[in-house]
Image (tube, grey):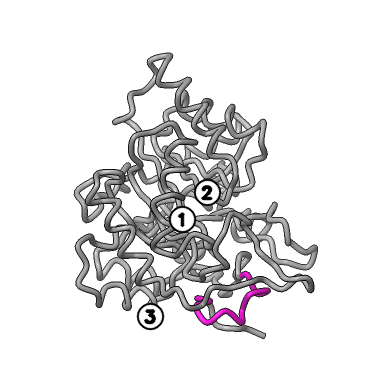
Amino acid sequence: MAKNALRLQSGALMPIIGLGTWQSKPGEVENAVKAAISMGYRHIDCARAYQNEGEVGTALKAKFDDGTVKREDLFITSKLWNTYHHPDDVMKSFQDSLELLGLDYVDLYLIHWPMAYKRGDVMFPKDDNGKFLYAEDIPFTDTWKALEELVSKGLCKSIGVSNFNQQQIEQILAMPNKVPVAVNQIELHPYLTQEPMVEFCKSKGIVVTAYSPLGSPQRPWVKETDPSVMDDPIVVEIANRYKKSPAQVLIRFAVERGIVVIPKSVTPSRIQANFESMNFELKPEDVRLLLNLNKNYRGCALEWIFDHKDHPFAVTS
């Protein structure tokens, strides 16, 4: 039976299901976080780039104030955005997130992507032709050293990465690190099962977190021709057999593999249904059926910046 939490190399316990907040619009995320905590969620996944950490902080304060939870009951993740990779910018960006969240510390802080953008407060810096502006002279290994300082100062409990490939993680592991790589957060679902990456991370004691476990059907750049994992006939057939929704099957798919999963929703009924994925188990043969759907299909490939030297994904035709 799957565990409700996974132990990080820091010794901290990370709840295996959390609420994702990417694409949660202003005015919606506060109520979503409050509803999730009231329903039993104890893990909230945030990021500076989502531009909604202030609302998350308002929701957290409300649930602290009404006695639903204490700070130590929750596991809060945030992420360093690409424009703040320079070591001199890491502390300021982190403290901005901490202030927005209304917290004294976060449980986990991740480098959101390995690619550094032009320094500054413009989240998506572009030239007059619409091309992204990079800061390729800032190695992510230097950024990692700055994150280690956050741990040494007691500002975060664990640190990790997101969207890094194996070679990039190995570069960090090869450093004389003071703090272990706790987590690699990656896109993961039956169309992108990530078996080699999951195996590699587990061999290094790195916990994997799955984002977009439902295939991120609402991502801003989705096309009508893109495959939809929630509509896959095998996913639907398995869901019907278990009398569950396709979303519940997809969330459970990650849980059965010992992977943390952070489905996003702002609808209370779906937030509840997603959490109820912890209340059933998939048979091993059904997990295998879902693994066999792999197409190595990425909904979040960021192909428009493939020319960045630190882009983590190989160019695919």
Q: Is residue 306 magenta?
A: yes
Q: Amino acid at mark 1?
A: Leu
Q: Considering the numbered disc 1 on the image, is that residue within a helix, a strand or a loop?
A: strand
Q: Which residues are magenta?
A: 302-312
The circle drawn on residue 167 is 3
Q: Residues within 10 Å of mark 2 (few under 14, many from 20)?
A: many
Q: Nearer the viewer, residue 288 or 305?
A: 305
Residue 34: x and y in percent read: 52, 26
Q: Amino acid at mark 3?
A: Gln
Q: Nearer the viewer, residue 122 or 105?
A: 122
Residue carrying label 1: 80
The circle drawn on residue 48 is 2
Q: Residues within 10 Å of mark 1 (few under 14, many from 20)?
A: many
Image-based side of 287 in relation to 75, left or right: right
Q: Write the residue at 27% across / 46% down.
A: 157
* Quarter of the image with the C terminus in it: bottom right
Residue 73: x and y in percent read: 31, 30
The circle drawn on residue 196 is none
* Alpha-carbon span between mark 1 and mark 3: 20 Å
**Is the residue 295 above or below the residue 98 in the image?**
below
